[in-house]
Image: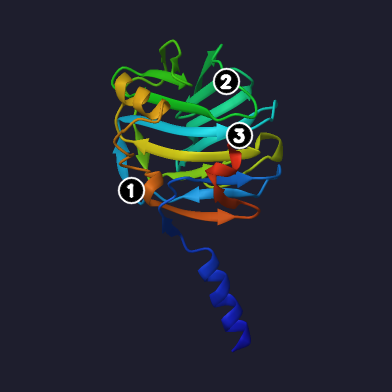
Amino acid sequence: MKRLAIIFSLVLLTVAERQDLSGKMFTFPVASNTHHVFLNPDVNKIFFAVSVCLRAFSDIGRAQSIFSLSLPSTDNAFLIFKPKQGVYNLYVLGEAVEFIGLQDESNVWNSICATWDASTGLAQLWVNGNPSVRKGVKPGSSLTGIPKIILAQEQDNYGGGFDATQSFVGMLTDVHMWDSVLPPDEIAYYMYGGQFNPGNVLNWNSLEFIKNGYVVIESQKLSSKADSS
């Protein structure tokens, strides 16, 4: 009976929970090949367009994964990957486009949005309100199957294959995902803290997720500068 109770407790620990994370952040304190957050969008549909927005706070200069979506057929189905400061790679169905010269900073919140339109293949990155050049990747394709979405690790297979040297260390907040390409004014509202329509695939204000390993949910105020007045 005691063994059954332990097994039941472990099952409970891995059940996805839904929370309103407004004003909160996920803190990933150490590099690892295990610690991550699994997001459960509970969708099985074909994506002909994608927009993902989030805010990241880190001081890591090495490569790190910002947002990783895999499909049964493709590990890097929609991956926002930062190889170094000011450079971002967006992978769509395993193919990457590189965006250079995007002005981000260490130890502050950086607002990041990535969009992709299957009909044209045009992809774009926005960082702190500044748009990248628009580049083409996988025109005429689609994202098909049940997605596995993971924060702080890069998936080398469907839901796993993590590498500590690509893990995210820092804080993430305000994660949203849409099944459409957000227009520039909506992206601006998100970037500058205005009113925007929450993601219809992932919504930070009603997010279903599973924490795995050393991940802490904290108030975002802990990352703000102290008031010296």
Q: Disc 3 to disc 2, how far (Cα)?
A: 18 Å
Task: Pick the residue in front: 46 or 113.
Answer: 113
Which dot marks residue 225? 3
> Where does the image place residue 48, in percent across and percent down from the top left?
30, 30
Taking the image as shown, residue 118 lies to the left or right of residue 69, namely left
- Badge 1: how crowded within 10 Å, few (<14), some, or many (20+)? few
Task: Pick the residue in front: 221 or 99.
Answer: 221
Q: Residue at x 59, y 17 (%)?
A: 86
Taking the image as shown, residue 209 lies to the left or right of residue 29, namely left
Q: Residue 134 is drawn in which quadrant?
A: top left
Q: Which residue extends farthest bottom? A: 1
- State the residue position of label 1: 43
Taking the image as shown, residue 104 lies to the left or right of residue 165, namely left
Quarter holding the C terminus?
top right
Q: Which label lies toward us, 3 or 1?
A: 3
Give the mark, 3 or 1, whose residue is nearer the N terminus.
1
> Where does the image place residue 51, in percent across and percent down from the top left?
37, 30
Q: Residue at x 61, y 51 (%)?
A: 215
Give the mark, 1 or 2, whose residue is nearer the N terminus.
1
Q: Secondary structure at mark 2?
A: loop
Q: Residue at x 58, y 37 (%)?
A: 224
Q: Residue 190 is drawn in which quadrant?
A: top left
Q: Amino acid at mark 1?
A: Val
Q: Secondary structure at mark 1?
A: loop
Asked if the residue at tag 2 contacts the one at tag 3, i.e. Cβ–Cβ closer than 8 Å, the answer is: no
Give the mark, 3 or 2, whose residue is nearer the N terminus.
2
> Where does the image place residue 22, in percent across and percent down from the top left?
43, 46
Quarter holding the N terminus?
bottom right
Q: Amino acid at mark 3?
A: Lys
Which dot marks residue 149? none
Which dot marks residue 104? 2
